Every structure is written in C-alpha cells, then in structure tokens.
Amino acid sequence: MDEDRLVEIETRLAFQEDTMQQLNDVICRQQDQIDRLAASAEALRGQLGEIAAKLPDEEGEDEKPPHY
C-alpha cells in the first residue's frame, strides 16, 4: 500500500514539474514578445516625432498672407 502511494506522489510530482516547465516556457516567450513590442512602439514614437518635426506649425509656412 505504501509503495502505491509513493508511486502516485512521484507521478504527481513529475506532472507538476512538467507543467511548471511548460508555464515557464510560455512566460519566457511572452516576455520576448513584450520586449519586441516595446522596441517597436519606441521606434514608432521616434518616427512620429520626426514626422511631427517636419510638419509646418499652425501659424507656419503654408498660411496665406493677410491680404489674400
């Protein structure tokens, strides 16, 4: 009887270890994806800043003189 119980405990432990490893793998992949998305968002912010800097101001160059 004790041996059956020990086998059941070992089986559960092996299953839990496998499950924890699978969860760890998922977390690592998710963190990699988060890092890539954060880098992409930062690059897009930089590009948006560059585009915004090139746009004329509201009172800028494209405004018609007052006599028109």
Image (spheres, helix red, strand yellow):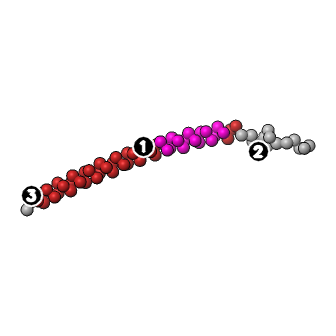
For the residue marked with disc 1, what is the amino acid? Answer: Asp
Labels 1 & 2 near each other (Cβ < 8 A)? no
Q: Which residue is mark 1?
A: 32
N-term-proximal mark, 1 vs 2: 1
In 3D space, how far apart are the residues under numbered discs 1 and 3 (Cα atoms)? 44 Å
**Residue 42 on the magenta segment:** yes
In 3D space, how far apart are the residues under numbered discs 3 and 2 (Cα atoms)? 82 Å
Q: Which mark is residue 3?
A: 3
Quarter of the image for residue 64 reads: top right
Q: Residue at x 56, y 39 (%)?
A: 43
Main SS of the magenta part reads: helix
Q: Which residue is mark 2?
A: 58
Magenta segment: 36-51
Asked whether, in this view, residue 16 is left or right of residue 59, the answer is left
Asked whether, in this view, residue 22 is left or right of residue 49, the answer is left
Give SS at disc 1: helix
For the residue marked with disc 3, what is the amino acid? Answer: Glu
Looking at the image, is 49 positioned above or below residue 9?
above
Q: Residue at x 50, y 44 (%)?
A: 38
**Residue 38 on the magenta segment:** yes
The extreme right residue here reads 67
Q: Position of residue 44 (x, y in %)?
A: 58, 41
Q: Residue at x 42, y 45 (%)?
A: 31
Q: Position of residue 21 (x, y in %)?
A: 29, 48
